[in-house]
């Protein structure tokens, strides 16, 4: 398989995928392709919060397939970009595949305090947000297994796994860049 200058970033909810992608874009001069933005846009269009829309997509797999196929199509005609998508590694196997992990308590804290999430994830407490993250993760994992036959929690799918629980986005980006450069050399 021919390697492409593409980094696919998957990971736990609130693991820092968006922030790290922004830093990588700046430092590498790559563009970003985000499936999550499309998912959120659709949730708003359907007038649902993310948990409701996740359940809706379970019953309408054609929406999920459309979202996931969009990254693959983009990679057919583009190079030098970052895919911020749960199944980016699966859609574009010739990419450098990164998984960002985070402890659920830290994820809930980050998500609850993130003002950008308030329009679709408006919870009254960190514990309530934590429960929603757990439910959404379980739903997504089951959907991906049933729809695509892949287990995104199998860390063997990735070239690099980084635990972001106690790292800044800049530290995570530096780790990724170092390993990405090594990966490109090992053709």
Image (cartoon, rainbow, N blue to C red):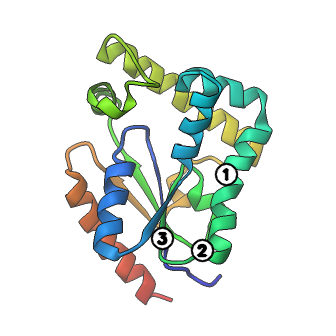
- Residue 17 - label: none
Q: Residue at x 38, y 75 (%)?
A: 180
Q: Residue at x 62, y 70 (%)?
A: 75
Q: Is residue 179 left or right of residue 88?
A: left
Q: Residue at x 53, y 32 (%)?
A: 137
Q: Position of residue 41 (x, y in %)?
A: 56, 38
Tell me if mark 3 has few (under 14), some (14-19) or many (20+) residues whose alpha carbon lies within 10 angstroms of its own: many
- The local secondary structure at tag 2 comes to loop
Q: Position of residue 5 (x, y in %)?
A: 49, 79
Eyeballing the image, is 88 above or below 7? above
Eyeballing the image, is 163 above or below 1? above
Q: Position of residue 95 (x, y in %)?
A: 54, 71
Q: Is residue 106 left or right of residue 148?
A: left
Q: Is residue 26 visible?
A: yes
Give whichever of discs 3 and 1 has the lower sequence position: 1
Tell me if mark 2 has few (under 14), some (14-19) or many (20+) residues whose alpha carbon lies within 10 angstroms of its own: some
Q: Position of residue 64 (x, y in %)?
A: 70, 42
Give whichever of discs 2 and 3 has the lower sequence position: 3
**Could you give the CA–CA distance between mark 2 and mark 1, rounded to whole angstroms?**
16 Å
**Could you give the CA–CA distance between mark 2 and mark 3, rounded to whole angstroms?**
12 Å
> Of residues 65 and 162, which is closer to you in this image?
65
Q: Nearer the viewer, mark 2 or mark 3?
A: 3
- Residue 68 - label: 1
Task: Count the numbered circles shown.
Answer: 3
- Residue 94 - label: 2
Quarter of the rendering containing residue 12? top left
> Of residues 150 and 65, which is closer to you in this image?
65
- Residue topped by disc 3: 81
Give whichever of discs 2 and 1 has the lower sequence position: 1
**Could you give the CA–CA distance between mark 3 and mark 1, rounded to whole angstroms?**
16 Å
> Of residues 41 and 1, which is closer to you in this image?
41
């Amino acid at each position: 398989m021919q390697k492409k200058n593409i980094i696919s970033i998957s990971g736990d909810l609130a693991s820092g995928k968006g922030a790290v992608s922004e830093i990588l874009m700046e430092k590498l001069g790559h563009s970003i392709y985000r499936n999550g933005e499309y998912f959120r846009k659709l949730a708003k269009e359907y007038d649902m919060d993310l948990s409701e829309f996740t359940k809706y997509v379970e019953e309408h797999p054609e929406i999920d397939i459309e979202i996931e196929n969009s990254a693959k199509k983009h990679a057919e005609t583009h190079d030098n970009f970052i895919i911020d998508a749960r199944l980016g590694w699966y859609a574009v196997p010739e990419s450098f595949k990164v998984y960002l992990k985070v402890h659920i308590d830290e994820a809930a804290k980050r998500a609850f305090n993130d003002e950008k999430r308030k329009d679709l994830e408006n919870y009254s407490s960190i514990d309530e947000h934590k429960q929603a993250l757990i439910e959404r993760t379980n739903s997504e994992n089951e959907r991906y297994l049933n729809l695509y036959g892949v287990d995104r929690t199998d860390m063997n799918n990735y070239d690099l796994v980084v635990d972001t629980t106690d790292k800044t986005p800049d530290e995570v980006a530096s780790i990724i860049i170092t390993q990405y450069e090594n990966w490109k050399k090992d053709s």
